[in-house]
Amino acid sequence: MSSRRHFNPWAFILPGVIAGGVVLGVPVVQAFWTSLHRLRLYRLHDQVFVGMENYLRLWQDPLFMLSVRSTVVFTVGCTVLSVLAGLMVAAIMSTRGIRGTTMARFFMAFYLVPFVATQVVVGMLGRLYVWEPEYGLVNFLLSLVAIDGPMWLISRDTAMLATVITNAWRLTPLAILIFYAALATVPDELLESAEVDGAGGLRTFTAIKLPLIRYHIGFVTLIQMTSAFREFDTVFALTGGGPGRATNVLSLLVYNEGISAANLGMANAIAFTMLIIVGVISLAYMRLARLDKAGE
Amino acid sequence: MLRLRIRPHWQFLVVALATFGLATGALAQVTLRIAEHPGPHVGPMEEYFIPMYEEMTGVNIVMEVLPPDQLWQRMQLEAQAGSDYYDIGYHSPGWFGYYYEQVAGLDDLIEEFGFGLDQYSQAVIDSHMTNSMLRPGEIIAIARNPQTPIYAYRLDWFEHEGEREAFEAEYGRELAPPATWEELYDIAAFFTRPAGATVADETLTSPLYGYSASVKPPGGMARAFLAIVYSLGLEGWDENFESDLRDPILLEGAAYWKRLIEDTFPPQAQTWDFLEHLSFMRESRLATAELWPEGVLTIEEEGAPTAGKIGYALLPQWPGNRKDLPVGRSFIGGGGVLVFDTPNKAEAFQFLQWLLEEQAAEFNLRTAMFARTDQFEDPDIVGAYDFYDTFLPVFEEQMSYGFPRQPIAEWGAVMYTPVGEFASDVLFDVMTPERAQERLVDNMERIFVESGYID
């Protein structure tokens, strides 16, 4: 009886474990195995084991460190911007008087547009219609207030900013959705008590709502961070990593090493390093969340 | 009450036979898939040649045009996977190493269908139709538009009296096509003017730039900067696979290139892949340009504001270059078409033979792409455009200086991409020129060792 009870749960999750192992595990192991080899795109049948050589060369390469720096700036920028924007919109949309109205429903649907747009399309739209220096939307708006806008994607000073804003725009809907749903769970009694106690909208938000949805904020932060960290499509379509290497984030470095430089061993070494970095960030977050919960 | 009414048997039989006939007919129809490079041939192929051939033969042709960097990747992917997806592919000698084992040798087909090779010069055969290292002794492609860049300039502005006087007053010499790269810089700097200034007595509504190529890194940058590298008399490596890129003259070239781009190129040039800068020239926003000949119709087609106003010259010399070259030069680029080793290779070859041999004159008239010697001699072709009087002699002469790329599989990985990255890293101060040069040479030597060319 007892062994039967223990067997059943495993039987239920076994297909998932096997599927996950095949779909996730095999490519990861394959990537790591390839990263230990010298493998060129033009000689795929000629794979030579080189041990950790690719990793050693990688960490000595100043361009890798440059890409790490770009990736950190990009990831932090996208995460902060999308979480803040998501919080702001969700807070407004969930305010009593606005929540549930036709207008609110319309705007919620409107805000979700970037979420369903293909990333490459977002990048192309950004490049051709938003940041384009002569006919783009941003410089047009700036010209209305007599500001001569820069060449956003061509200048090293502004390319990263434009890239971060574009990608944050794409990430924000997820934050809005989750925060909106989370804010809907805040008990009305608490809000009413706060109102009776004379707390204003801002005070209610910072003292009651924010603490109650902090796990959601943490979750969204983690999701946005990992998403931005491995972002490729939008950046590739928007700047291609340029100007120079100003927006050459790690995923683009993987592509350039693997495809342009035909060095699949090195590309996999970078990709595997990225996986480790994301893994460490995720574990650190989960540990912090657990400590926080334990302290409650 | 429901009554099922059964039609006479012969009606079913007719329908069944017709369906079967249509289905087997559709199955029997050959479909040729072409992986194609963008260029002036795409329009005529889609609108004229392919429909005509399909109607003539019943062969179905699907052409996919991909951006250059994606094109070879896709061809390699399909070839390595053995999918037989593409029957015909664009042939760039620099990419051949990525799929050379899956390309059909054409000698048997040439003999079977009687394709004439006598109209191709030996230089074109060597650079675009054979590969002496990877597929020795075989014809592996048909050249379609082998070419090397030349210098294009606004002839009307160069002849304008006021501009000539102003230039002479500033530089102490006549305004004429540059004899050296430094002269090219002077001319470019002279014509680089802000909006509101005038050029040839006309007020500029937007800034005018002096010179440009399309320099999006790494591909566009590589293609354009290699004109400097080869003009310096450098070739990448010699017959012993010893790199000549350690030469300090490369740093002189890189410093010059940085100055030229920063002072005279439109900033947008960094986002352009190949021929986009010619559209800028067509809009009279560019005074002089690097011109890969296949782009000539952008500035010369009937109705273009610049038609008939363009002069052509050889690339200028780099004094002190390592090969004592009398003029500048670049690699022989452009390309051809190859046939993948698929079940449709005979049909694919027949289509190419029809297009590039039977329709050679018509193809040239519609695309301005030259590959065969008879195209340079055909009175109908030579007389097709007025600008050919000045353009064709320059094109032919510049080709005689063109550098045929070394036929190794690693050419892209040791030369094209790394040279583009080198130029880009110097331009954007990513690292010092010396460090970038060291990186370039180290990469080349490491790959040569890996490939067993050197110890």
Image: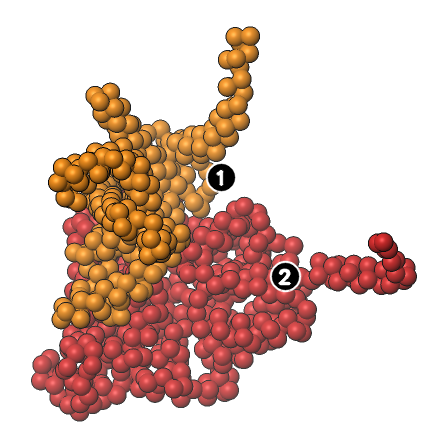
Chain colours: A orange, B red
From where the camera sits, is residue B313 visible? no
**SS for callout 2:** strand
Which of the 4 image quadrants contains residue B87? bottom right
Residue under the image location 19 percent in, 60 percent down: A155
Closer mark to the observer between disc 2 and disc 1: 2
The amino acid sitting under disc 2 is Thr
Q: Residues within 10 Å of mark 1 (few under 14, many from 20)?
A: few
Q: Position of residue A55 (x, y in %)?
A: 30, 33
Residue under the image location 50 percent in, 13 percent down: A6
Q: Residues within 10 Å of mark 2 (few under 14, many from 20)?
A: some
Residue under the image location 40 percent in, 86 percent down: B302
Front one among A237 and B73 = A237
Q: Position of residue B21 (x, y in %)?
A: 78, 62
Residue under the image location 33 percent in, 85 percent down: B305
Front one among A280 and A10 = A10
The residue tagged 2 is: B31
From where the camera sits, is residue B351 visible? yes
Position of A73 with respect to A267 (left or right) is left
Residue B399 to residue A163: above or below: below
Which disc number belongs to residue B324?
A: none
Q: Position of residue A45 (x, y in %)?
A: 49, 39
- Quadrant (top left, top right, bottom left, bottom right) of the N terminus of chain B: bottom right
Front one among B383 and B242 = B383
Residue lying at the far front of the rendered structure:
A196
The residue tagged 1 is: A45
Front one among A120 and B351 = A120
Position of B386 with respect to B184 (left or right) is right
- The chain ID associated with circle 2 is B
**SS for callout 1:** strand
- Marks 2 & 1, CB-CB < 8 Å contact: no
Q: CA distance from mark 2 to mark 1?
A: 31 Å
